[in-house]
Amino acid sequence: MSTATAPEKPSQRPAPPVEPSEPPGTQENAISAWLGRHQFALRRLHSLMGILFGGYVIVHLMINATLFEGVRYDGVKSVYQLQVDKIHGLPFLNLIAWTVILLPILYHTLYGFIIIAGGRPNVDRYGYAGNWGYLLQRITALILVLFIAFHYLSFKGAFGGELGRMLTFVPVDSPDTPYSEATQSTVNHLNAAWWIGWFVYPIGIFAATFHTAYGFWTAGITWGLVITARAQRRWLVVCTVLFAFMTTCGFLALGSGLAGRATDEPIPGQVIIDPRVGEKTPDPEMAEEIEQETGTEQAPAD
């Protein structure tokens, strides 16, 4: 007697494992966790880049203070032009600018936004001087971001129109003019519009000097250089004097620039604004043609 056997079931391949989907916010949590694990190193680097940038601000304001001499129209270079020539005569200038100025500013700014986002000002409950300094340091940081962007881009000629031409900084001195291009273009920059010299720069100077001086104050504590209360009081006096010195240099430069005489004609090296050529320096033939049609002399391209 034969017994029937049940047919074998075809073998089935095991289903691939289903990877669990990441819950929303996992990537953000991972970034936050990484920042938390490396917070000590990141904050120390942020402080170090701030010290480096603060040193640049001090030197920058001291050089700008030489604008006190004013614009010379006797063909002799101004003191400010001589300082600009020294800077632009440095070897590997672009490398120095990126490593000492631009990259420190970028890192200090980006990580500063993270610090500001996690900050909790409490001056409404505890109105101590340190709490107000904490708040003002973050307010001036936001102001500085906007001011530096305007200052840098306008000096580089990033804005268009007649205002953009007046704002453009010309570092190289031309022997064809009786004045120093760096000095005259800075005077033109500050007098390009009333709100630039009387609103933007006063606020920018105060923001830069306070942020730098208070940053040095907190850096001294952060790096363990001033531990005792007595040492901190002395360091506070030093930082206060530094704030007064930088602010004096900044407003000395600003007042000297505002007192100068702005030029209406384009400075050699600045852009020429003409509807036919746009915002650029025309070639010699185009400049001569424009001059014949309009009766105004146009500076040819270098």
Image (cartoon, helix red, strand yellow):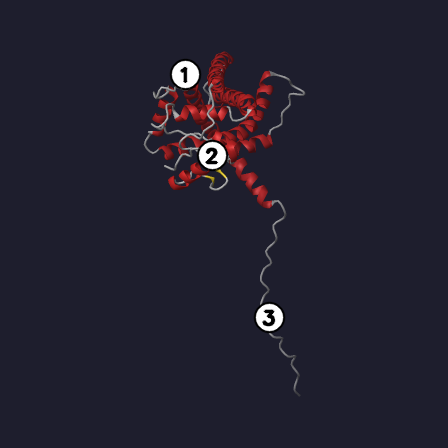
At 61% from the left and 50% from the top, the residue drawn is 22
Pointer 1: residues within 10 angstroms few (<14), some, or many (20+)? Answer: some
Type of residue at label 3? Gln
Q: Up-down: is 139 above or below 23?
A: above
Q: Residue at 57% of width from left, 20% of height from top?
A: 133
Left or right placement of residue 19 versus residue 159 in this view: right
Discs 2/3, front: 2
What is the spatial separation of the Cα atoms under label 3 and label 1, in whole angstroms? 91 Å
**Element assignment for label 2:** loop
Instruction: Choose mark 3 or mark 1, whichever is in front.
Output: 1
Cα separation, mark 2 vs mark 1, equals 25 Å
The residue pinned by badge 2 equals 157
Find residue 97 and report its horizontal and vertical position in percent. Answer: 40, 32
Q: Which of the two residues, 220 or 159, is positioned nearer the viewer here?
A: 159
Q: Is residue 105 left or right of residue 140?
A: left
Q: Of the two numbered discs 2 and 1 on the same chain, state the one appearing first in sequence.
A: 1
Residue at 35% x, 26% y: name it: 85
N-terminal of the two: label 2 or label 3? Answer: 3
In percent of width and height, residue 279 lies at 48, 38
Residue at numbered disc 3:
12
Q: Nearer the viewer, residue 87 or 44?
A: 87
Q: Residues within 10 Å of mark 3 (few under 14, many from 20)?
A: few
Which residue reaches farthest bottom?
1
Residue where numbered disc 1 is placed: 69
152 in relation to 203, above or below:
below
Mark 3 or mark 1: whose residue is earlier in sequence: 3
Asked if residue 41 shows in the view, the reply is: no
